Image (cartoon, grey):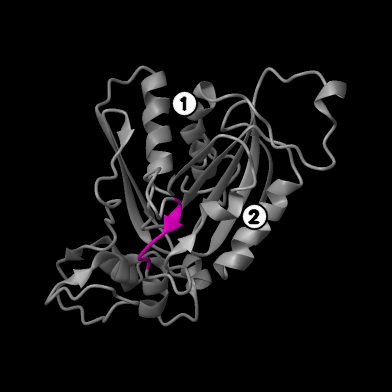
Amino acid sequence: CLSLRAAPHCPRLSKLSRAGRLLAANLRQSTRSRHRSPRAVTAQNKPSRAMPILAAVEGGGTTFVVALADGAPDNIIERASFPTTTPAETLGKCADWLRARSFDALGVATFGPVDPTPGSKTYGFITETPKPGWRQANVMAAFSEFAVPKAFDTDVNAPALSEYRAMVADGYDLGSVAYATVGTGVGVGLVVNGKCVHGLLHPEAGHICVPRFPGDSFEGHRPSLNCAGWVEAEAMTASGALAKRAGLDDSSGLKDLPDDHPVWDCAAH
């Protein structure tokens, strides 16, 4: 299950609900505070809750999803989605939705590259992304009004960390986890020894050069690298690339392509 857009019966946690697991350590170690909506009942008139309300934002290249979970990241009680348009419009809609609700912590996971390093001048930014209009977008500034513990990372590191923690809780002896997603973009999240891999920049697995499929001459979709005889992984396999290769107007028609369509062999390569 790659996102909340997955089928509701999926047995694994959604990507957005996993993003809430980023908050666990921060919430336990922080002073408990709650963002209360203007409509919320005051603390004096309402018994204190034993379990926290977790808020999460998952930002994809096509859709942003916001949700609340009660007590555990997979216990989602409310959610909404908004098309990814401009940073001001999309993040504004997410903030408006959260502003009308009460919650104890907020986790934000978006497409990258991002700056996930607290204290950095560009912490909370989507940085050198090829996504039009989103380069140097200050994501976390849109949620600065919420005085609750917050966490920020990529939309692949968040589920990678959640999968790691869930498997450890199930008794698996793990040293590392890699989580790959293919959608509007291509990304890989890495967890090693229980921590997300960041380094100088977040590893951008979609923006690497790979060998071309034999006999293929497709130029790719919005490539950002000059691969000198090879091809950029994301430019050949993301949903926009698959749609362009298949002659479709957009990616919504991919679901109707037959299994033996040649686009799938190229993508699999």
Secondary element type, mark 2:
helix
- On the question of residue 29 being in view, the answer is yes
Q: Which residue lies furthest to the left in this view?
A: 229
Please check the rendered image and state whether residue 128 is part of the magenta-colored stretch, yes or no.
Answer: yes
Cα distance between the residues tagged 1 and 2 = 24 Å
In x, y percent, where is residue 147? Answer: 63, 38
Residue 175 in the figure: left or right of residue 27? left
User: Mark 1–mark 2 contact, CB under 8 Å?
Assistant: no
In x, y percent, where is residue 209? Answer: 18, 66
In x, y percent, where is residue 168? Answer: 36, 22
Q: Label for residue 114?
A: none
Q: Residues within 10 Å of mark 2 (few under 14, many from 20)?
A: many
Indicate whether 56 appears above or below 89: above
The magenta stretch is 124-129
Q: Label for residue 94?
A: 2
Q: Label for residue 25?
A: 1
Secondary element type, mark 1:
helix
In x, y percent, where is residue 148? Answer: 61, 35
Please check the rendered image and state whether residue 242 is part of the magenta-colored stretch, yes or no.
Answer: no
Number of marks present in the image shown: 2
Look at 64% across and 47% down and name the residue there: 145
Look at 49% across and 76% down and name the residue there: 250
Look at 49% across and 81% down and name the residue there: 249
Mainly helix, strand or loop, the magenta region?
Answer: loop
Q: In which quarter of the image is the C terminus?
A: bottom left
Residue placed most toward the observer, 123 or 66? 123
Look at 31% across and 28% down and name the residue there: 194
Residue placed most toward the observer, 55 or 258? 55
Residue 15 in the figure: left or right of residue 212? right
Q: Which amino acid does label 2 sit on?
A: Cys
Q: Tell me which numbered mark, 1 or 2, is placed earlier along the sequence.
A: 1
Q: What residue type is labelled 1?
A: Ala
